[in-house]
Image: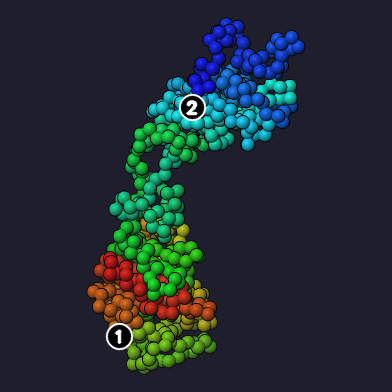
Amino acid sequence: MNRPVKLGIAGTCTALLVAGGIGTYNLVRGLTGGATGDGRPDTARTFDPSTLSSTPPSDATAVKLTRAFLDSWSEQRFEGAAGDTDTPATATRALHSYKDGLRLKKLTFDHVESAGPSTVTPGATKVTFDVRAEVAGGTWTYPSAAAVVRSTNGVPAVHWNNSVLYPGLGDGQSLTAGKLPAGASSAKVVASDGKTDLTTFSSLRDIAATIRQKVKPKGGAAGTGVAVVDGEGAGIKTLEVFSKGRTPVIRTTIDARLQTVAEHAVTDAHLQNKPAGTVALDWSNGHILAIAHTGDDGDIAINGIKSPGSTMKIITSAALFDQAGLTADSPAPCTDSLTANSQLFHNDPGVRADPGSTLTQAFTVSCNTSFIKDGFHYLVHNGDASALHDEAVNVFGMGSWSIGGGVATTDPSIPADAQGGDQAAQFIGQGKVTATPLFMASVAATVRGVGFKQPVILPGQHQQSAPRPITGRTAGYLQTMMRSAASTGTAAPRLGGLPGVGAKTGTAEEGDHTNGWLTAYDSHTAVAALVEGGSSGVDSAGYVVRQLLTSS
């Protein structure tokens, strides 16, 4: 029962097969497929696939036929082996493919045993066996099985499908041995240190999967073994490894240490489980150092398109400097409320009116009416309110750029044709103005780095440039204002006392709730965070940004 199959048919019978040219197929049918009335084999009877019996063959019949089939297969008499199946032509091609794909040297079978009626193939008896294949690179052993059916005239046949070659091998698939093909083992997408796998970070798993699919890996060396491949030869699954290779890697700009901080920051207890997203950039080159998010609406760090609230006052201020010639000390009276285009605007609670306020002072306390009054007065001309849009595009690089690797991001929007109340609301990041933490981190980076560097996640990727570089004058004014907001203004409760930090908070109204924003920079990093449902920027996003800045 447990001998190799090549011993399954006596030597005398084998000699008869060779000498007489009688295939195993007909011999087995003579032995198992019935006889004439006087007991002599009825060799005229053959398997008829159109008249299958619903009664499984006996265990003995199924085992005897399977051993004959395996004997022919092991001796590479493929036509003879295929003749013992219910689809000889298909089986012949598959057996040849098995030999060629594995570069087969020797094949033996053992433990050929009946497993009783098949639970997969109706009217069949299942026969199990062990396979030992000497293939390119090593020896591969595995268990397999065949289902034996019979036609109504009593003649049995091995029911052919690719699972006879290897369990679960599907149509259109084949086996290969030797050097493992591309795709048989996945490339690893790693952080900038070249070793930390991005899939270890929950926020980056989808990003890593996209990059792995879209970007060709570098380095690495294929191992050897046995694999399943598709019709194009691409690896589907590794079945056996003879020698391990070196996994190819795709290096990203992600800072593993800062990413760890970001993952923790978006779950800070002060956020009370509200959805949050954050992005950190190296402002000197635009490299994305961290992306983290929570919530059920996807990656809000790079796709959370929301009104950015008062963080937009950075771009509004830049437009006032560049297009209206104002300075950081220009008048910007802060009133309790203001009507523009028949819409009433007011300040956040705690902002006190100051008729003598300058732009820097209004920015520090985040006075809405100051920026609406100056923006509407200096930047809207004869109903044309495109100045803020133009500043965002030309200086801050707003547009449809890609961070690389096929990773989808959502573009910000400042409509060039704002109408009615939106003409005023845009200057404080409301109305139809939308942005993501990714874009607002880039805005802070542009101020600190004195120039737009398009954010990228792959080192060496082409970066689009802004049509017009930010001037040193404008960047200097903005840095002064953002340092004031961080040290004594709306961001001070979280960021006050941190060296070299500039910031801007934002609280944006959305339906029946508000969203909290904060964007900031220090001597190395630019960061932005959004907390959906945050009561204010400093008391929600502020906690996220502080953790990143104190760890950068």
Mark 2 is on which residue type? Val
Query: Residue 390 location in percent, x, y?
Result: 43, 72
Crowd class of label 2 (few under 14; some 14 to 19; many from 20; radius 10 Å): many
What sort of colour scheme is used for the picture?
rainbow
Q: How many marks?
A: 2
Position of the C terminus, as image quadrant, is bottom left
Residue at image mark 2: 131
Q: Is residue 124 left or right of residue 261?
A: right
The Cα–Cα distance between marks 1 and 2, rounded to whole angstroms, is 85 Å
| Residue plotted at (41% across, 73% down) | 271
Residue farthest to the top?
A: 19
Query: Residue 338 location in percent, x, y?
Result: 46, 90
Q: Quadrant of residue 468?
A: bottom left
Query: Residue 125 location in percent, x, y?
Result: 63, 29
Label 1 SS: loop
| Residue plotted at (34% across, 90% down) | 357
Q: Is residue 241 visible?
A: yes
| Residue plotted at (43% across, 69% down) | 276
| Residue plotted at (38% across, 48% down) | 188
Up-down relation of residue 304 to residue 425 (above or below): above
| Number of the front mark, 1 or 2 | 2
Q: Is residue 24 left or right of residue 461?
A: right
Q: Quick one: label 1 or label 2, which is nearer the N terminus?
A: 2
Residue at image mark 1: 329
Please name whichever residue, 83 or 111, is drawn nearer the observer in this view of the structure: 111
